[in-house]
Image (cartoon, grey):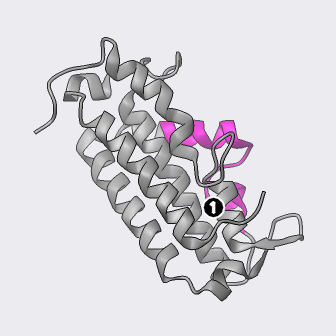
């Protein structure tokens, strides 16, 4: 898969964020925090929002480590284990957070990520950065991997849209926030 440009990457991230936000905003607070409603699992809409933000946090950590010329070691930066364990660790961490805190921190993380990507030069975007396996990869490609969905780099939000859409259309619909 070819590396996307910074503009293409931020456009995809913003589009996914916007689509998720429209759906999240259709849920009242009770529906937003109701457990076991997303994707047939244990997650609430709040958990999904926190999950998306977590992977944006990892992308920000990837940017920080690349500036130092280091590979991001997820097992050192966040939690040991594979992706499922990382997601479980994050779910546990944010389960205690209020809905308002998850909303606020998710928005702040997203804005920070977009700002950081937009500030990168083309040279930095295409620079080879170290991986944990001692290989090197273009920074834009690495960020695309971190933020990928099953079919698209920078498309993580799109992987979760169908589950959230189904929940909002079903029993999850409540008064809109506001």
Query: Where residue 47 sits in the image (x, y, percent)?
Result: 42, 34
Query: Where residue 48 sits in the image (x, y, percent)?
Result: 45, 36
Name the residue rendered at 28%, 53% in the picture.
104
Query: In which image quadrant can residue 78 be found?
Result: bottom right
Query: Where residue 121 sits in the image (x, y, percent)?
Result: 58, 87
| Secondary structure under the numbered disc 1 in the rendered image | helix
Q: Does the magenta stretch include residue 24?
A: no
For residue 35, say whether it is visible: no
Q: In which quarter of the image is the N terminus?
A: bottom right
Question: Is the residue 21 above or below the residue 171 in the image?
Answer: below
Question: In this image, 121 relative to 130: left or right?
Answer: left
For residue 14, say whether it is visible: yes
Where does label 1 land, which residue?
77
Residue extending farthest right: 134
Question: Is the residue 35 above or below the residue 129 in the image?
Answer: above
* Neighbours of disc 1 within 10 Å: few (<14), some (14-19), many (20+): few
Q: Give the range drawn in magenta.
A: 72-91
Decide whether the magenta segment is chiefly helix, strand or loop: helix
Q: Count of labels shown?
A: 1
Name the residue rendered at 82%, 65% in the picture.
132
Q: Does the magenta stretch include residue 90?
A: yes
Q: In which quarter of the image is the C terminus?
A: top left
Q: Which of 10 and 29 is in front in this view?
A: 10
Query: In which image quadrant can residue 151 be found?
Result: top right
Question: In this image, 26 relative to 64: left or right?
Answer: left
Question: Is the residue 106 above or below the residue 118 in the image?
Answer: above
Query: Where residue 3 sits in the image (x, y, percent)?
Result: 72, 66
Residue extending farthest left: 178
Name the residue rendered at 41%, 69% in the picture.
112
Name the residue rendered at 89%, 70% in the picture.
135
């Amino acid at each position: 898969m070819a590396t996307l440009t910074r503009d293409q990457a931020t456009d995809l991230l913003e589009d996914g964020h916007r689509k998720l936000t429209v759906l999240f905003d259709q849920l009242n607070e009770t529906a937003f925090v109701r457990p076991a409603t997303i994707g047939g699992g244990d997650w609430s809409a709040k958990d999904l929002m926190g999950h998306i933000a977590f992977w944006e946090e990892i992308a920000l950590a990837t940017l920080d480590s690349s500036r130092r010329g280091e590979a991001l070691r997820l097992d050192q930066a966040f939690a040991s284990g594979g992706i499922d364990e990382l997601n479980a660790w994050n779910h546990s961490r944010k389960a205690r957070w209020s809905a308002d805190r998850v909303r606020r921190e998710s928005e702040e993380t997203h804005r920070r990520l977009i700002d950081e990507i937009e500030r990168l030069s083309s040279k930095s975007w295409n620079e080879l950065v170290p991986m944990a396996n001692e290989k090197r990869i273009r920074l834009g490609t690495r960020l695309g991997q971190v933020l990928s969905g099953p079919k698209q780099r920078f498309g993580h939000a799109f992987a979760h849209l169908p589950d959230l859409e189904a929940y909002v259309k079903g029993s999850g619909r409540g008064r809109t926030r506001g």
